[in-house]
Amino acid sequence: MLKFILRRTLLMIPQLILLSIIIFMLAKMMPGDALTGAFQGNPDVSLEQLEKLREKAGLNDPWYQQYGRWLGNAVQGDFGKSYVHQQKVTSLLAGKVENTVILSLFTLIVTYLIALPLGIIAGRFTDSWADKAIVTYNYFAFATPLFVFALLMMWFFAFVLGWLPYGSSVDIKLESGTWDYFVSRAKHLVLPVLSGSLLATFSTIQYLRNDIIDQKLRDYVKTARAKGVPEAKVYTRHILRNSLLPIAAFLGFEITGLIGGSVFIESIFSYPGLGYLFIQSISTRDFTVVTALVMISGTAVIVGTMLSDIILSIVDPRIRIE
Amino acid sequence: MAKKQLMLLASLMLVLSVFLAACTGKDDKDGATEKEPSKDPGKTEEVEGEEEEPAEDPNAGLDFPLEVSNTADPMEDGEMTIAMVTDTPFEGTLSRVFYKGTFDAEIMSYFDEGLLATDGDYLITNDGAAEYEISEDNKTITIKIKDGVNWQDGEPVKASDLLYSYQILGHPDYTGTRYTYMIENVEGMPAYHNGEAKDISGITVSEDDKEISITYTEATPSLLSGIWTVPSPRHHYGDIMTGEVTMEQLVESDKIRATPIGFGPYKVAKIVPGESVLYERFDGYWRGKPALKELVLKVVSSASILEALKKGDIDLASVPADQYLKAKDIDNVELLAKVDLAYTYIGFKLGKWDDEKKESVTDPNAKLADKRVRQAMWYAMDNETIGKELYHGLRFPATSLIIPVFAGFHNADIETPSYDPEKAKALLDEAGFVDTNGDGIREDAEGNEFVLNFASMSGGETAEPIAQFYIQNWADVGIKVQLTDGRLHEFNSFYDRVEADDPDIDIYQGAWGTGSDPDPSGLYGRTAAFNYTRYTSEKNDELLAAGTSEKAFDTEYRKDIYNQWQELMADEVPVAPTVYRYALTAASKRVVNYSIDPNTDLWLYEMGVSE
């Protein structure tokens, strides 16, 4: 097991390097740089001055030179300086990572809290009214664009009912560390988390339901039933264990989807996390931040798939690698 | 069974689409405005007749107030919430010398101010925290800080704090974008900037540290609107001159990101990065006691701003122009508007940038070298309709390159082309651009095919309709125009190509923010990098130089020069200004003592809320 994890981890390194090269190249191919937009409304800066700034920031060097510099520093944990925010990328991200991790973690938990029971019910009681309702909800979740749904949720819960705040991560007037502060943070999380997770459930529900229906007809289930195993136990002990396999395998992709979704959720709810920052950095050509952010989400994908493999090998002894 | 499910799904989607229309602020009216430009002469006249209306009065047609109507007294210890409408977080570099984003500027405006106040023409006055005097030769300005002006940590504001701003801006390690002409113009600044001198020879500070005099290499009236007067708190930041901190440390430090100070009416109590700022009243404010006890400034996404205003959560917000129609129906809010420091224009590519000489070179054989063709294209554009239909009147036809905001210099009387397709046709005929092969499209003077490539930026719902509308306008007078590459271009790529004089661009649509100095040489001078049309002429050089010469301290003289320049531009038409724009502010009806008029007598510290 340890050997397996170690091997996967080592394999990550060339994957990440390749990823960084592609990203760096693509980022440099985008027209414009961080200084292109800086002159708008500021026509008083001379051309020489602008050129000097470009030169200072190393923006005139060919991409492979810039990449070499970047990689050298990145290995030492220095991801360069954000041109727009004028601070180290690492300290810039440090403030936002926490927000996004909290948001993603809760979204993931709530997604499974909703999806697992629903998938099990739908699979176990096929064609009942509950199943039909769940399947309908699932089509709905599959078809609805995230940003539309998020706006709808905001409109209804924040403006019509007025129960929840419509944006930001906390009420600024509360002193951090107090009980009220945590309540306020939790309240601000409800809408983004619900908007994200109510839609993220569809794949889990669908896979779980199909697999349970599939497993129900298998010989080992018939055997169990014939031996007189109680129905509830047939499901919890026999069917569920096998049906959860694809769900576990899906965890990695689920994490990737969350990071993609946070771009929408965070900018709609003005929630200062990585996704929010990502949009800004792309439009202002803040390359260092873009590169760092894509590296983070790339790493998350790679780690996520590795996690899936590990979970899979734990729950399914058949594919365990010795 | 399956059919029933499908029905249910379909009805759900239907309900959803209704919500969608309600939520995204999409305006059906916008889509419906690809109105056929009027081809029959009767209609043309009608439009023309409307254009006779004096477009000079910026508030003509639309009656927006500049000041809130509530005249009650502000309540004691009121609290206010102000929205920054944006879909991206603010950067939070809260120092005038370092900041980049406009929202950072807004955040600073509540805790920080310049030492000299400005009037309606953006010229410096003596009403601020300091008074100034300009020497006989117009080269030296002396600024004297008034008594009782203190930083929010209790330290007095010193003349050497203003010096510190200049020391940072000119510093060899400085990487911001504010080393401008007016900074460079300070005597001894280039030497200091290149690291040849330790001090800036043109700036001296008095013994008692209350008076500073700045001497310029060249006297220019831009001094009156372009002088830097925001001090930097040396005791708070630490001193880069003594090596106490380095430039890099200072930019990254919490001193400007978490605990910035100024000497404005409100002090920063707390910042949630990228999201909101909490201010408290600064009791030691030099003008007097600020009306509000607390002030919250927070980011609100453009999707939720209208609902937030309606709910009464937000007292003040700038409203995006495309949400105007919905915003004006909100009961508890009133809309204020002023003409923005900007204009949109169509640029005609007339030459190339010479990288060796660092100047624009006009090509006499350029496709659009004949000014009559350019004039005709201006005459052909129906900007009135664009402003009315696509912007609901929030944009209106532009006449001159000096915007009406500069009331003293904007000349409303010069003859500028307004929508008149017949005139356009006549001009084209005169220039010899006639249709020789009978396909309805004019050929150029030599009888060759004449097709123009038009570059325009993407962004917003109106970008595509506007570009298509102009193309139709030009087609109406027989000029064939097509979009460069057949599509719109993203902002960065657009400016990259325009700047590089891409041969696939003959004309382009751009916009400029003018800043508060009427001097246009940064955009139209021979050596100006932003002179994207590459238009040059001796007369132009002459007038631009005269406009900022020492003689131009005489306002009448300067006015005359800029009149001549505006006339020259309207005749030569290197660019055709299309529309000026209004900037909208929504204020809750409980807001008092607030005005967006730069000419107002109200100061920020008086702004408050009524019961």
Image (cartoon, coloured by chain):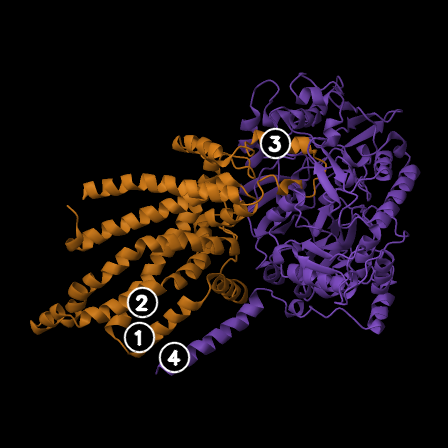
**Residue contact at pointers 4 and 1, CB within 8 angstroms:** no
Which mark is nearer the camera, 3 or 1? 3
Which mark is nearer the camera, 1 or 2? 2
Which residue is nearer to you in this view: B591 or B458? B458
In the drawing, what numbered circle is on residue B5? 4
| Vertical placement of residue A268 versus B274, above or below | below
For label 3, the residue is A53
In the drawing, what numbered circle is on residue A131? 1
Which mark is nearer the camera, 4 or 1? 4
Q: Position of residue B470 (x, y in %)?
A: 73, 61
- Most extreme residue toward the left, as rendered? A227
Which residue is nearer to you in this view: B147 or A9? A9
Say which quarter of the image contains residue B32. bottom right
Regarding mark 1 in the picture, which secondary structure is present there? helix
Regarding mark 3 in the picture, which secondary structure is present there? helix
Q: Are marks 3 and 4 on the same chain?
A: no
Which mark is nearer the camera, 3 or 4? 3
In the drawing, what numbered circle is on residue A66? none
Which mark is nearer the camera, 3 or 2? 3
**Residue contact at pointers 3 and 2, CB within 8 angstroms:** no
Distance between the alpha carbons at the discs numbered 1 and 2: 11 Å
Distance between the alpha carbons at the discs numbered 4 and 1: 12 Å
**Chain that is purple in the image:** B
For label 2, the residue is A206
Would residue A78 be visible to someone looking at this image?
no
Would residue A246 be visible to someone looking at this image?
yes
Instruction: Give the letter of the chain under mark 4.
Output: B
Q: Position of residue A263 (x, y in %)?
A: 47, 53
Amino acid carrying label 1: it is: Asp
Regarding mark 2 in the picture, which secondary structure is present there? helix
